[in-house]
Amino acid sequence: MQQARKKTAGRKKPPAKTASKSALKRKIAKAEPSLKSIVIDALSDMKAVDVKVLDVRGLTDIADLMVIASGTSDRHVRAVAERVVEKAKQAGFRPHGVEGQQDGDWVLIDLHEVIVHVMLPRVREFYGLEKLWDIRASKRAASRA
């Protein structure tokens, strides 16, 4: 009996079959909506116009995505921005900052990995953020020249 104990005493027990922490986090992440979908849903709820999502990961370190949308009036721009902030907070994403809410021409919402620009169409056209940040558009323009 003692010999049998000695033989098994040196052996390691096989690891218990439990879900790893990273696998558990992945399951939770799949169940929870992403920040991108929360922002898009909030913009859609408030009838934001001409919503564009730009992947800026290769262009800057400040954010992964940039979302650009228009409002029909300064009041609409402010209301759309307020809804985005409200929905993000409800989902547990605290904005790092919100700028331009007083004027209502252009409201910028910094949600860390996603930056949201809500602006009037004339302001959007003047600054041309899509042309500045959309790498595909800049590549097309370069190939035409």
Image: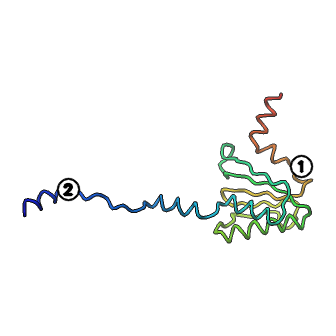
Q: Nearer the viewer, residue 115 or 99?
A: 115
Q: Quadrant of the N terminus?
A: bottom left
Q: Is residue 64 above or below residue 83?
A: above
Label 2: how many Cα within 10 Å (few below 14, some 14–19, many 20+):
few
User: Which residue lies at the image location 28% right of the left edge and 57% below the top edge?
Assistant: 14
Residue 101: x, y in percent? 83, 66
Q: Is residue 131 left or right of residue 3?
A: right
Q: Quadrant of residue 37?
A: bottom right
Residue 83: x, y in percent? 78, 68
Q: Is residue 68 left or right of residue 35?
A: right
Residue indicated by mark 1: 125
Residue 20 got which mark?
none
User: Which residue lies at the image location 79% right of the left edge and 62% below the top edge?
Assistant: 43
- Distance between mark 2 and mark 1 Cα atoms: 71 Å
Type of amino acid under label 2: Arg
Pick whichever of labels 2 and 1 is earlier in the sequence. 2
Residue indicated by mark 2: 11
| Dot 1: element | helix
| Dot 2: element | loop
Label 1: how many Cα within 10 Å (few below 14, some 14–19, many 20+):
few
Q: Nearer the viewer, residue 4 or 117?
A: 4
Type of amino acid under label 1: Glu
Q: Quadrant of the C terminus?
A: top right
Tag nearer the camera, 2 or 1: 2
Q: Is residue 90 left or right of residue 3?
A: right
Pointer 2 with pointer 1, Cβ within 8 A: no
User: Which residue lies at the image location 70% right of the left edge and 47% below the top edge?
Assistant: 56
Q: Nearer the viewer, residue 133 or 34?
A: 34
Q: Is residue 133 above or below residue 49?
A: above
User: Which residue lies at the image location 58% right of the left edge and 60% below the top edge?
Assistant: 30
Residue 15: x, y in percent? 31, 59
Q: Is residue 142 left or right of residue 71?
A: left
